[in-house]
Amino acid sequence: MAQTAIESLDEARETLREERRRVADEREAFDRFAHLLAGVEAETPTADTGSRALLVDGGASAGARAVRDHYRSTVMSVPHYDSDYGDSYRESLAIEFGPDVAAALDSGFDARTKQAVHAAARDAHADRDRFVDALDGEAVALANHRERCLAIAEECLDIADEARDCADYGTLDALRTRCLTLEADCDDLAGERQRAVRACRVDLGLPDAYPNLQEYLYAPLGVDYPVLAATTDIAARLRDCRQTVERRLALAS
């Protein structure tokens, strides 16, 4: 019982560590891209610079080509890019910086376009930075809840062992009280977690249509809220343990 509940939290922690690594890689990639971008000289617009076909065919201005090369060597070179995204250069630009910025690069790389691309890169970096902070907070919360869940689960096992061959009314009554206290602890833990999930959503400023951070992170595990699932599992075992104690109490009275 305890092992199953704790294993689910350990899987969640590993998933979280992997996600943090990916987001941190992206954060650093956008930071590097912004620094490289600063060294690309803005061009004076001309009547015949740029078109989408020229960009795709490699005939874009020198500035636009430099932006493309820097973007590919940073943002599109993170280890997980192909497996997680697989977007083309222009698709990625439109997703990360918006279609207007992506379209502007079709016409060259003047000062206004450079400013827009640099601001978009900085925004992308800041978004990843905030997300890393949220993931770090989630990691601390997971570690804390794992420790508390493990302590409750182990005490439940101790109570079950002590009650197994016990016929003393006073001892059984004390064990029943311990079960009730631990059940209340589980309720408190679940309530605390639910409040933290809601607070995290507010802190990230997620739109209504977006899933909670925990749903996004843990959906591949088959359980969106592993802390609540573990707490519910342990609470159910505690109730079973208490009911066993109460049956023995009835026989001892």
Image (cartoon, helix red, strand yellow):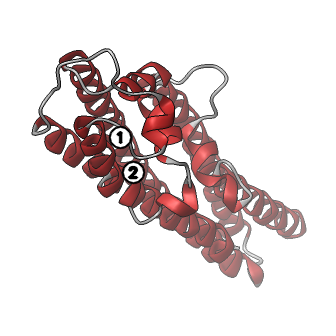
Frontmost residue, 135 versus 240: 135
Q: CA distance from mark 2 to mark 1?
A: 6 Å
Nearer the N terminus, badge 2 or badge 1?
2
Percent x, y of residue 126: 29, 33
Give me the residue at 45% from left, 27% from top.
51
Amino acid type at circle 1 is Arg
- Give the structural element (helix, strand or loop) at label 1: helix
Q: Report the residue marked by disc 1.
A: 128
Instruction: Report the residue that reaches farthest toward the front.
Output: 48
Frontmost residue, 49 versus 8: 49
Instruction: Report the residue that reaches farthest toward the bottom.
Output: 165
Query: Taking the image as drawn, is residue 212 in sight?
Result: yes
In the displayed structure image, the side of residue 77 where residue 190 appears, left or right: right
Percent x, y of residue 188: 56, 40
In the displayed structure image, the side of residue 16 where residue 184 appears, left or right: right
- Give the structural element (helix, strand or loop) at label 2: helix
Amino acid type at circle 2 is Val
Q: Report the residue marked by disc 2.
A: 23
Percent x, y of residue 187: 63, 42
Frontmost residue, 144 versus 204: 204
Up/down of 248 relative to 71, above or below:
below
Give me the residue at 75% from left, 63% from top.
237
Percent x, y of residue 149: 55, 60
Work out which quarter of the rendered image holds the N terminus and state it. bottom right
> In which quarter of the view is residue 66 placed?
top left
